[in-house]
Structure formats: structure tokens, C-alpha cells
Amino acid sequence: MQFTKESSIVKSYVLLIQKEIKTIDDIPNLFNLREVVEQCLE
């Protein structure tokens, strides 16, 4: 499975990180999830 910038889980993590509820370290190391979230935050 590959996540994209359009995946709902990616959007959710991006929002949570932007609101300072979660951090990058809270993202599970699941497939490419962390990588895609980091790309969205750049």
C-alpha cells in the first residue's frame, strides 16, 4: 500500500501536526506514511 498527499490519513496527520496536537515522531512507520506527511509539511 502506498499513501499519497490525497490520502485521508495523510491529511489528518498534517492537520494534527499543524495544530501542534501531534509531532512527526507520533506518525507510525507504516509504508510511506511518514515520508508523505513530511513532504506535505515542507
Image (tube, rainbow, N blue to C red):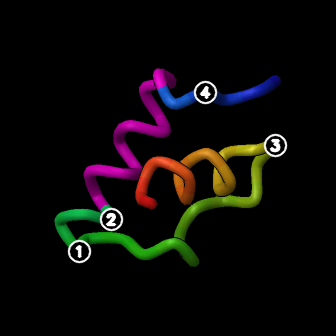
* Element class at badge 4: loop
In three-dimensional space, the C-alpha distance between marks 1 and 4, rounded to whole angstroms, equals 22 Å
Three-letter code for the amino acid on which mark 2 is drawn? Ile
**Which residue in the structure is indicated by mark 4?**
4
Image point 38% across, 37% down: which residue? Answer: 11
Residue wearing tag 3: 31
Q: CA distance from mark 2 to mark 4?
A: 17 Å
Mark nearest the camera among 3 and 4 is 4
Disc sitting over residue 17 in the figure: 2
Q: Secondary structure at mark 2?
A: helix
- Residue 30 is situated, as x and y percent measured from the top left of the image, at 76, 48
Tell me what residue is drawn at x 41 percent, y 58 percent: 41
Earlier sequence position, callout 3 versus callout 1: 1
In the rendered structure, which amino acid carries the disc numbered 4? Answer: Thr
How far apart marks 3 and 4 lie (CA) works out to: 11 Å
Q: Which residues are magenta?
A: 6-16
Q: Do callouts 1 and 2 mark residues in contact (Cβ within 8 Å)? A: yes
Q: CA distance from mark 3 to mark 2?
A: 19 Å
The amino acid marked with disc number 1 is: Glu
Toward which corner of the image does residue 19 lie, by quadrant?
Answer: bottom left
| Dot label at residue 33 | none
Q: Determine the residue positioned at 57% across, 62% down.
A: 27
Residue 25 percent coordinates (x, y) = 57, 77
Q: CA distance from mark 1 to mark 2?
A: 5 Å
